[in-house]
Image (spheres, helix red, strand yellow):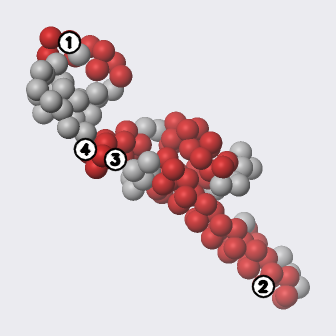
Amino acid sequence: MRLGWSHGDQEVFSIDQMIELFDVMDVNKSASSFNPEKLLWLNQQYIKESSPVHVARHLSHHIGLLGIDPAQDRHCMKVVKAQQERAKTLVEDGGQQRVLLSGLRAVRREGRAEESERGGTAGLGAVA
């Protein structure tokens, strides 16, 4: 949005703010430069400020491509909340989801196997 246009020093805008503040008369005539690092930073700001439910909804496509069904995994929302401050893109966050959820599944399987070897079911709630 800011290529050739600005509103003071403000970097992050909601859609409503952009609609309200944008004026074509404020577009600069000088050449603009595209900064991919700044775009990643800006994307990260939007991810951080969005609700976890909103992020999860948009993330579901990306983690679905990685073989994870977010509707079937009750830990997805916990991982979204944990990664929300760090993720710069949904693709990056999807990759983290896969790593973390795979780790959780391995811990659950290991806990169940150990409990099975002992012949009981106590403690399964802690790893489920």
Name the residue type under label 4.
Answer: Asn
Q: Quadrant of residue 26?
A: top left
Q: Earlier in the sequence, mark 2 or mark 1?
A: 1
On screen, residue 125 above or below 80: below
Residue 118 in the image: state x and y as whole percent.
84, 88
Q: Earlier in the sequence, mark 4 or mark 1?
A: 1
Residue 70 in the image: state x and y as whole percent.
67, 48
Q: Which residue is tagged 1? A: 23
Name the residue type under label 3.
Answer: Leu
Q: Which residue is tagged 2? A: 114
- Give me the C-alpha separation between circle 4 and circle 3: 9 Å
Q: Which residue is tagged 3? A: 40
On screen, residue 110 above or below 102: below
Label 2, residues with CA under 10 Å away: few <14, some 14-19, many ≥20: some
Q: Quadrant of residue 67?
A: bottom right
- Which secondary structure lies at badge 2? helix
- Which secondary structure lies at badge 4? loop
Residue 60 makes an appearance in the image: yes
Residue 7 in the image: state x and y as whole percent.
15, 25
Q: Residue at (80%, 81%) from the top-left corner?
A: 113
Name the residue type under label 2.
Answer: Glu
Q: Which residue is tagged 4? A: 35
Q: Earlier in the sequence, mark 3 or mark 1?
A: 1
**Quadrant of the frame with the N terminus:** top left
Is residue 79 found left or right of 20 in the rendered image? Answer: right
Q: Residue at (33%, 26%) from the top-left corner?
A: 14
Label 4, residues with CA under 10 Å away: few <14, some 14-19, many ≥20: few
Name the residue type under label 1.
Answer: Asp
Q: Earlier in the sequence, mark 2 or mark 4?
A: 4
Q: Earlier in the sequence, mark 4 or mark 3?
A: 4
